[in-house]
Image: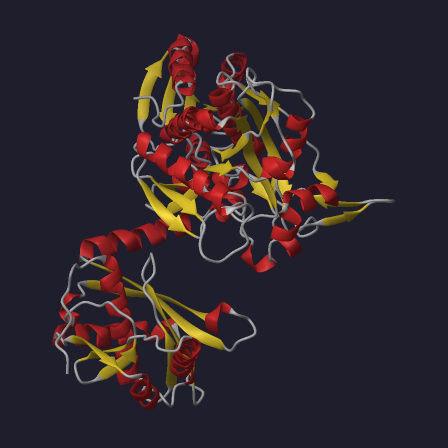
Amino acid sequence: MSQPQNNQNSDLHLIRHSAEHVLTQAMQRLFPNQFLMAMGPATDDGFYFDFEPINDFKISEEDFPKIEAEMAKIVKENLPIIRKEISLDEAKKLFAANPYKMEWLNSIQDRLDSTPGGGEVITIYSTGDQFVDLCAGPHLRYTKQIKAFKLLSIAGAYWHGDEKNKMLTRIYGTAFDSKEALEEYLHNIEEAIKRDHRVLGQKLKLFTISKLIGAGLPLMQPKGMIIRSEIEDYLWQLHKNKGYSRVWTPHLAKEELYITSGHAEKFGDNLFRVQGKEEKFFLKPMNCPHHMQIFADNQFSYRDMPIRYFEPATVYRDEKSGELSGLTRVRAITQDDGHLFCRISQLEEEISTIVSIIKDFYTTFGMISDYWVRLSIRGPKGKYLGSDEVWEKAEGALKLISEKNQLPFEIGIDEAAFYGPKLDFMFKDSLKREWQLATIQCDFNLPERFDLSFVNENGEKERPVVIHRAISGSLERFMGVMIENFGGAFPTWLSPVQVKVIPITDDQAEYAKKIEQSLIENDIRVELDDKSETMQNKIRTAAGDKIPYMIILGGREAENNTISVRQRDGQDLGTMTLSKFIDDIKTEIVKKSLNLIK
């Protein structure tokens, strides 16, 4: 028997993979011969274990305390987690009664048969002498090294994620290297439930999902449209002085456009098809082929390059209904799209400018402190347009630019767009959840497909390079992320209502209307609450609506021509003149400050 494996590190992957084995062992102790093990990997957030119940075995989250107690016993026993290499025949004998393990082993057999002379190491891991599983590892050395774990939920899952296969039972859990880290994670889960953008979106009347219109096709309420417009206006503010021109393109095009671009083949059944009286159309799945046509209808020379187009435009993809969710997964996707047509020699400067825009944008939203970038390149499989030479040139250019801009990047194999490599920017929200938002994509292929060119200094036609870039990713998804990031308590510049005016009694009604009008004249979004309710109820309603500021007006304020200001978190800013408040809040709005007035 081999010795326990050497633990090179105690990172979360090792902890979580080991915790999954302990979960499986605990269940075997508690429920012997009542289920078949399927699989159980570590994930970015924790781990899960899939199994097939047998003999009418059923399990629910009510069983979690009992299972966790058994897991704690196994951890306390400090059992060694031992790795052992065995032959394929030995493995088949060991797991002969388990069809899921046998499927993996048979796939290994098939690979060995197709590559004579090849070899493949088969490993098992045992926890002491009590539990064994077919697994590639790695794991911790002893069970006691698992410091903190928690079972989270239970769900159904198809084997291999294929709905044609048997439905299995899946238990989700997580594990961390300390109880403090686990408690923070569990706290964030609770916060995520409170901040769910679908719930807040309904409560704050930001957007609507109508069954008559269809899933994945959200409608912006007036307040939601204010947020969307503020984000869109800010995006244009970041671009308008950097050589970009705004364009507009229609929502559909003839199918020939997307056959030429390759999108028809790439997106296949995800395309919405429209039959006209004489011609066939697609609702556009991407904006780039349209922008190619705008470029093609001009006669540019090298002196004009780069050409930069900007268009926040909606594209459409027929996503599966079960995958749709609020604003973060939709069928109508409004990309803050931009396409730059440039020379290869201009790539570095143009992409560096885009990187600076991305940094400015996410700094404003407080998400810049812990980001990283995935340099997405081709993998060995997948449908990619273009020659190896073109891809190597594009991938090399993006890598060099990432290094020169000192981006915290990692290589993502098989993550590229079908027409070229890309830089995907990964940002964390206030709950430390990671989101892929901004992207920069380098494309040598579509200019070739559309035969685009400009005249160079030698009077010859030269093929441009296209840079695809989106800063927010999509306005819908970014709004969903922002609703949850701020928990609906948006910074003042983004808040649909920035000030609520609250007269204490009807005697202050006229004064309240004057205050309201002054705020309107200063482009401050304001609502007057003159309902016949108590002041405390009005304050509670305004705080529940997450309005940044409340102006409280009583007899003293009306008499002295002053206002009393309170923030949504309950902080009392005291009495001041209206002009001072207007100066302070306008400064806060112009600066797009994350914090309210001190």
Q: Is residue 474 left or right of residue 546?
A: right
Q: Observer-nearest residue: 68 or 62?
A: 68
**Colour mapping:** secondary structure
Percent across and percent down for residue 307 are 56, 22
The reply to whether residue 548 is in sight is: no
Check the image and report above or below for 114 versus 195.
Answer: below
Q: In the orientation shown, which residue stands out farthest toward the right?
A: 277
Q: Observer-nearest residue: 253 or 459?
A: 459
Percent across and percent down for residue 488 are 44, 38
Which residue does the image show at 63% across and 48% down from the upper left? 317
Q: Observer-nearest residue: 43 or 524?
A: 43
Percent across and percent down for residue 37 are 36, 80
Which residue does the image show at 20% across and 85% down from the upper left? 130
The reply to whether residue 127 is in sight is: yes
Check the image and report above or below for 423 versus 92.
Answer: above
Which residue does the image show at 72% across and 45% down from the upper left? 282
Which residue does the image show at 63% across and 46% down from the upper left? 262
Which corner quadrant of the image does residue 73 belong to? bottom left
Q: Is residue 357 left or right of residue 338?
A: left
Q: Quadrant of the N terminus?
A: bottom left
